[in-house]
Amino acid sequence: EAATFFASMDPEGMHLGNEKTAPIFIKNFFADFKTVLGRGHIIKDFKKCDFEPIRKHLNEQKIIRKAISDEEKQKNKEERNDTMFRFGYALVDGHIEKVGNYNMEPPGAFRGRGEHPKMGKLKSRVAPEQVFI
């Protein structure tokens, strides 16, 4: 999963394509990537890692997602609306209020803006037990 986070980044994009931010991003990502892999893993040098097969697979999946039919798009939109009506409103002091954000941020590589010192760090998945309302 962590390798997919890196492969999903555009190599010429704002983080990896920028000569100032790329070393920070890669250093932080590789430090977290090594902890995910474990102590005795064979990967020691980031330059020897090839994320291109994963990147190719992600691009193929993107093309498949864009090629869905209008019926499937409508079905997906209805599911999102059902979810929004189910979780998007709360009863507060007897009044119905729209909830600002009912979605959790998915795990991934932190991107940040500009030359953020933590860009490239891995964001972990949030478990339901960690959420308090």
Image: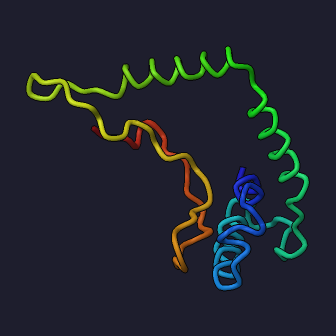
Give how far across and how far down residue 105 sits, in percent. Answer: 49, 47
- 76 vs 34, nearest the viewer: 76
Q: Which image quarter: residue 23? A: bottom right
Q: Residue furthest left?
A: 93
The colour scheme is rainbow
Residue at the extreme front: 70
Name which residue lies at 55% across and 47% down.
Answer: 125
Above or below, 87 relative to 106: above
Residue at 48% x, 40% y is 127
Residue 61: x and y in percent read 80, 38
**Quadrant of res 97:** top left
Image quarter in which the C terminus is found: top left
Q: How many marks?
A: 0
Closer to us: 36 or 100: 100
Q: Quadrant of residue 24?
A: bottom right
Q: Would you place residue 44 above or below residue 101 in this image? A: below
Residue that extends furthest to the bottom in the rendered view of this protein: 20
Say left or right for 1 vs 28: right
Q: Position of residue 64 (x, y in %)?
A: 81, 32
Which x, y percent locates residue 108?
A: 61, 54
Residue found at x 55% / y 57%: 123
On screen, 92 above or below 105?
above
Question: Looking at the image, which residue is at 53% across and 76% down?
Answer: 114
